[in-house]
Amino acid sequence: GAVYRGLKPIHWCSHCHTALAEAEIEYADETSPAIFVRFEMTTVPAGLEAFAGKLDVAIWTTTPWTLPADMAVILHPDAEYAAVVHEGRALIMAKALAGKICEKLGWGEPQFVDWSATGTELAGNEYKQPIFPAERGTFIYADYVTLDDGTGIVHSAPGHGVDDYNAGMKFDIPVIMPVDDDGCFYMGDELGCGGPFGGMEVNEANPKIIEWLDERGMLLLHEDISHSYPHCWRCKRPVIFRATTQWFVSMDKTGLRAAASDQIDNEVQWIPSWASRRIGAMVADRPDWCISRQRYWGVPIPVFKCKACGETVATEATFDA
């Protein structure tokens, strides 16, 4: 009962054309573009009626190429959010970060509106999808959003990240996947495709997306940062998070995580002793185990699908055969 097939974001190597488990990932430093962007709001929270039509939400992301799949912005449920006025428009951001943000943007001291709300209170508001403005994104909240950096509001593409996916599932946010096996955007002008960036590889699209946002007055700031980024153990190239249909072992449905943690804490002697904390943290934070691969060698999963009706055939008899 622990094995299931599902559409979830996994580590995907667009060079090797396969899913990767967490254990197959190596980390190395990469330089990425970090951008502050304003999304135009289409709803007006109570108390900001004076800024109807002149109201934005500020987000921060290090993956501009995921913006075509944006479907939500995520706030911390208990954090206090404020609105800062600049050149006649109001911009919603975490109040604790407003001073740092305004300094970065060259706006001087923040000019606050007499208004504030928590992430929970703002949930359900909507904004124009940044690449496809006829579509709408939704305000949601999750505990993992921090006030350490950025704007305290995270752009969310549930098809491109495990945390975004898990948060989105709680609010019925759809999973959009505009990127193919080669790491290139699908051609097309509708949601689920690359729009103006159709056919481009995601890293190739990054500077084009930033330029596109800047031309439309949506880009607030662009700066490059160095951070640890996952790479494929086979080809040593950076991987992407991409929602595909794979086979998984659930870490929690049959108690695998709890049983493994109990063995680590109580049954195994670790030399040196601190090693238990390292492996324990890995098990505690590990997502469901992706066990399928899109490779032409190795041991395949002995599961078959009926071509006529699509039903999965996986029985004791087929396994034995």
Image (cartoon, rainbow, N blue to C red):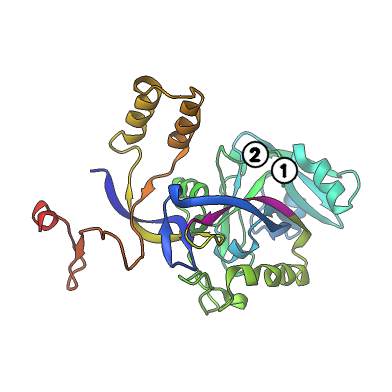
Q: Which residues are magenta?
A: 225-233
| Quarter of the image where one finds residue 89 | bottom right
Residue where numbered disc 2 is placed: 146
Disc sitting over residue 244 in the figure: none
Q: Amino acid at mark 2?
A: Thr
Proximity of marks 1 and 2: CB atoms separated by less than 8 Å: yes
Residue 87 in picture, x, y percent from top left: 87, 57
Residue 24 in picture, x, y percent from top left: 45, 51
Question: Is residue 183 left or right of 116 when viewed as pictured?
Answer: left
Vertical relation: 171 (above or below) 254: below
Q: Is residue 227 magenta?
A: yes
Vertical relation: 67 (above or below) 163: below
The residue at 77%/68% (across/down) is: 214
Q: Amino acid at mark 1?
A: Asp
Quarter the C terminus occupies: bottom left
Residue 74 in picture, x, y percent from top left: 59, 47
Disc sitting over residue 149 in the figure: 1
